[in-house]
Amino acid sequence: MLLFLIIFIFSFSSVSIAKEKINSQKKDKITIALINFQAVWGDKDINLKKMLNDIKEASSRGANLILFPEMSLTGYSMEQDKGLKRLDRMQVKLAEKYNGASAQAVAKLAKEKNVYVVYGYPEVIGNDPLNVYNSAIAVGPKGIIGSYQKIHPFGSEVIWCKTGRKPFIFSTPWGPIGISICYDTYNYPELGRYYAAKGCRVILNPTATSRSYFAASELVDGKPVNDGKPLNGNNAQWVNRFKSRVEAVVIQSDIFVASSNLIGAETSAAGKFMGKCFPGGSSVAGPLDDKKGTSSYIGYYGTNPALATDVGIIYSDLDLSKAKRKSFENYIKTDLQSKYLYDPTLYAEWYTDLANGKYTEN
């Protein structure tokens, strides 16, 4: 356990990295398409068709990278039957291998349109049908790149999915990009700092976040008002919570965080409401220039989580040169410093202490 924890946090060998050669000269300008996606619960065919149409539209509008939400391929909600066997749960039954039929279809289109695509799905690894993870796959102009398994499943997700163990970085013409799914991003800064330390200037956050959004409790005849989409400012509490979480990552590491969220009520193809509503709010948060008169150090670059309240594609044009990752270097170097202020060796000592059993759960 001790060896694993140190390797997980600080060693290059622990991270899944796509072996795709790129030019040594990184590009700075990138257009990211963020998808407010309303999944049809439990229907991969319908969702995949919608995703392919979104890829076609976004690529025709000049997007370089297209980001879908967490579990967009199948829907996120879990059946409320506590006695249901894990093997019979929707996410497990519909899980695909990273190079499965859906990924092949997306990869074919990504090659044709010369774009990168990341989307969330339940992934089965190997031949054990229960070896299932909450994952995100990355594909690019050269085909399927690889997949990331969520390291920190949230709440009831642990009933159906296993816990991932490795960060995931893939190479692009804009430099390395990391994937961090939902709770990974909001509550575990270790992963975001790892990606930033590895040189990532943008982290992709496919998410299914709805905390502080209460549309699922506002029902008329058993169905959410406005199909579960934000109405009359009922997303305000969610926006406040969401912004504080992504902005913390931005300001700590001086990088961009691109988030795509599910939106609206999750309903099966037969019309059954599955108990979850999502507020959308797909957006990109990133650093602003630190100039005289600056009142905010974080911008949303053509996006606004409070206003992205319907199904659709939101485009964000970024200049990644603004992601200077300042906390990973010393502003002033003197003989009082033995090394960079960012010191993984020091942190390894702390985490060794925790890994040796001196961490106590409440």
Image (cartoon, rainbow, N blue to C red):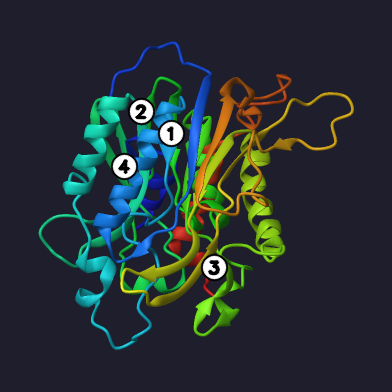
Q: CA distance from mark 4 to mark 3?
A: 24 Å
Mark 1 or mark 4: whose residue is earlier in sequence: 4
Count residues near mark 1 (Cα–Cα under 10 Å), then give few for <14, some for 14-19, many for 20+.
Answer: many
Residue 322 position, x and y percent, is 64, 24
- What residue is shown with label 1? 58
Residue 61 percent coordinates (x, y):
46, 27
Name the element at disc 3. helix
Q: How far apart in space, not on screen, are marks 1 and 2 (Cα)?
A: 9 Å
Specify which label sits upstream in the sequence, 1 or 2: 1
Amino acid, disc 1: Ala
Q: Earlier in the sequence, mark 4 or mark 3?
A: 4
Mark 3 is on which residue type? Gly
- Separation of disc 1 and disc 4 at Cα? 10 Å
Q: CA distance from mark 3 to mark 1?
A: 25 Å
The quadrant in which the C terminus is found is bottom right
Residue depth check, mark 3 versus mark 2: number of the one nearer the observer: 3
- Identify residue for label 2: 115
**247 in relation to 145, above or below:** below
Amino acid type, label 2: Val
Q: Is there a contact, CB below 8 Å, between mark 2 and mark 4? A: no
Query: Which sits earlier in the primary sequence, circle 3 or circle 1?
Result: 1
Circle nearer the N terminus (3, 2): 2
Which amino acid type is shown beneath numbered disc 4?
Leu
- Looking at the rendered structure, the secondary structure element under dot 4 is helix
Q: CB atoms at circles 1 and 2 under 8 Å apart?
A: yes
Q: Which residue is mark 3?
A: 228
Residue lying furthest right in this view? 293
What is the number of the mark on residue 52? 4
Could you tell me which residue is drawn at 30 percent across and 64 percent down?
162
